[in-house]
Image (cartoon, helix red, strand yellow):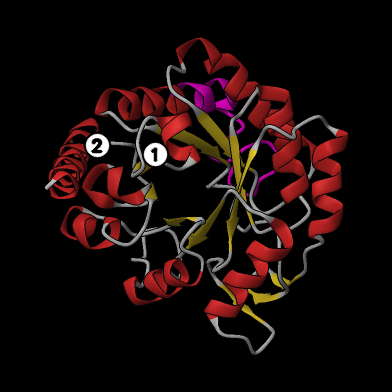
Amino acid sequence: MSWLQDLFGTDKAIIGMCHMLPLPGDPHYDAKKGMGYVVDMCRRDLSALQEGGVDAVMFSNEFSLPYLTRVETETVAAMARVIGELMGDIRIPFGVNVLWDARKSLDLAAATGACFVREIFTGVYASDFGLWNTDVGATVRHRRHVNAEDVRLLFNIVPEAARYLADRDIESIARSTVFNNRPDALCVSGLVAGAETDSSILKRVKDAVPQTVVLANTGMRLDNVEKQLSIADGAVVGTTFKKDGVFENPVDPSRVRQFMERVRAFRSKSTASSAS
């Protein structure tokens, strides 16, 4: 039994993404509509995700494109306002992801009471956002400094729009990440949000670290639920839940319900198989 069961009530967890619209300081922020509009749209998506039956939600500044690897203070402040205003509406465990700044994610988690964060904690990458370096030792010490030691850490080891600079296979990366850092989970991604996670890479990671929670981080859809969940311990799902499956659109409650029905059917079948 993994920590997923303790926190989410299932060993095959689905974390639904609650994407915030552009925030103050972002290139595409709509100053005329203001932060009230950002809060309202986030509340609508949160409601759709919860009503659809996801196990948890993760708030992220998904539309702060192009992303920073050292995020400005105003972004974290805006995200904290949104989550603060939604606190009375949140009925399930939630996490945060300040793209792409691990320390700022921990700061936001500490301020809002988030249960987990997803970030790029380790490695050096050539990315669309420039040379992307990390300092996991400093980050986990910062976690202690802000009293966020109970926050679960989801390590994305195949970040989107980036390539690991070292010539290492994914199994080596997974094993050394687990040995050196004791992550709560490893996330395996496709190229960008909505792109299917390569199931062969997902399996290689899970086989390399069978005792560690491994999540499919992008691109789970109705047609690959069984394939992906037969390997992974769960998934982070965003684009699939959007109207017409389009990244920029709001969450469609009917798509969430349909997807979660498929997930529950898979869980029931897996439980029956295990019992027999």
The residue where tag 1 is placed is: 16
Secondary structure, magenta segment, majority class:
loop
Q: CA distance from mark 2 to mark 1?
A: 9 Å
Residue 20 appears in the figure:
no
The residue where tag 2 is placed is: 256
The residue shown at (24%, 55%) is 221
Residue toward you, 168 or 36:
168
Q: Amino acid at mark 2?
A: Val
Residue sitting at the far front: 276
The residue shown at (43%, 59%) is 193
Left or right of 88, for residue 5: left
Residue toward you, 99 or 230:
230
Regarding mark 2 in the picture, which secondary structure is present there? helix
Q: Which residues are magenta?
A: 19-40
The residue shown at (72%, 51%) is 101
Q: Amino acid at mark 1?
A: Gly
Residue toward you, 2 or 119:
2
Q: Which x, y percent locates residue 182? A: 67, 55
Residue sitting at the far bottom: 167
